[in-house]
Image (spheres, rainbow, N blue to C red):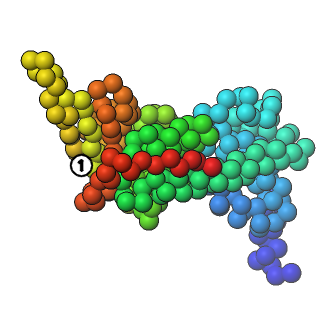
Amino acid sequence: MQKGKADSISIISSLPEDVALKIASLLQVRDLCALGCCSMFWKELCFSDCIWESLVRNRWPSLSSFHFPSSSSTHSPSFEKLFVWKIGLQKWRKLYLERHVELGVRARSVVKFLEACSRSESLEVGDYLKAVDTLIGTMFGFEDVQRFLFNPQMNVLINLVGVHYCLTTLGIPGDNLVEALRIHEISDRRVCVRWWKVGRWYYGFRMRDESHSRWVSLADLATEDDEHVLGVLRRGAVHEVLRVQISVVGRPSKPWSCNSYTEIN
């Protein structure tokens, strides 16, 4: 065996377990898995529950304790968690991987649904809110939205659904959301929101229905610079608002007779 390689193995083997655990706990999932392939020592540590429990809780903080495996350990890597590592359980890693795959499948179904509903580059608010409700029901996390819905190659209407969910359900601060949009290069993408309101009554006669439209960027919505538009999207077609439609800027709107009845699988 070469001297340099032997010295490297010796250094790794001599690391205190809590130090090695701290190193692994600072890594992202991809780097953690890569480190776990380096040796049996790192494989046993990087694939242990004491690491993956924190990854699960950090990625999906909205999940209640009911959804998590029972654990008597604390949430952050510590000496106590070394005992869990020694047992060799991997229920948290399994939960992370299964949920990651599940959310990927659900995200693809939402994307297909939105694509089917917006073939002419416009989307009715009922379908829009149905997609948002699917994200709520599946309890997507902020990382999931960025990974699956903030792709610049996707239709901007899909990006918009992700922004709406982050604001109204996850409560992501505007600055954090704008930074995520900037990183994914979609902050300047724009949509046109149109809504029709029942005409006002004037001396016993009802005036024509009122048409309103606004062009807005994803970054503007994230910072709520145009709070009125966000309010229209949140409420949908209710009370005096007859219809709300979102379209890609520069694209013609669908006629009144074109309504989508596509279901999300």
Please identify the residue farthest to the bottom as the structure is shown: 2
Q: Is residue 13 above or below residue 263?
A: below
Q: Position of residue 171 (x, y in %)?
A: 45, 33
Instruction: Identify the residue shown where x is 16% and y is 34%.
Output: 208
Q: Is residue 157 above or below residue 63?
A: below
Horizontal placement of 44 versus 234: left or right?
Answer: right
Residue type, numbered disc 1: Trp
Across the whole image, how many numbered discs are drawn on residues? 1
Disc 1 crowd rating (10 Å Cα; few below 14, some 14-19, many 20+) is some
Please identify the residue farthest to the front as the structure is shown: 204
Element assignment for label 1: strand
Residue situated in front as seen by the camera: 263 or 187: 263
Residue situated in front as seen by the camera: 52 or 255: 255
Question: Is residue 188 in view from this perspective?
Answer: no
Instruction: Identify the residue shown where x is 32% and y is 56%.
Output: 248
Please identify the residue farthest to the right as the structure is shown: 87
Q: Position of residue 73 (x, y in %)?
A: 78, 32
Instruction: Identify the residue shown where x is 36% and y is 48%.
Output: 257
Horizontal placement of 259 versus 86: left or right?
Answer: left
Which of the image's four quarters has the N terminus?
Answer: bottom right
Residue situated in front as seen by the camera: 243 or 99: 243
Residue at mark 1: 215
Q: Position of residue 182 (x, y in %)?
A: 37, 55
Instruction: Identify the residue shown where x is 24% and y is 49%.
Output: 215
The picture quadrant where one finds residue 55 is top right
Q: Position of residue 71 (x, y in %)?
A: 80, 32
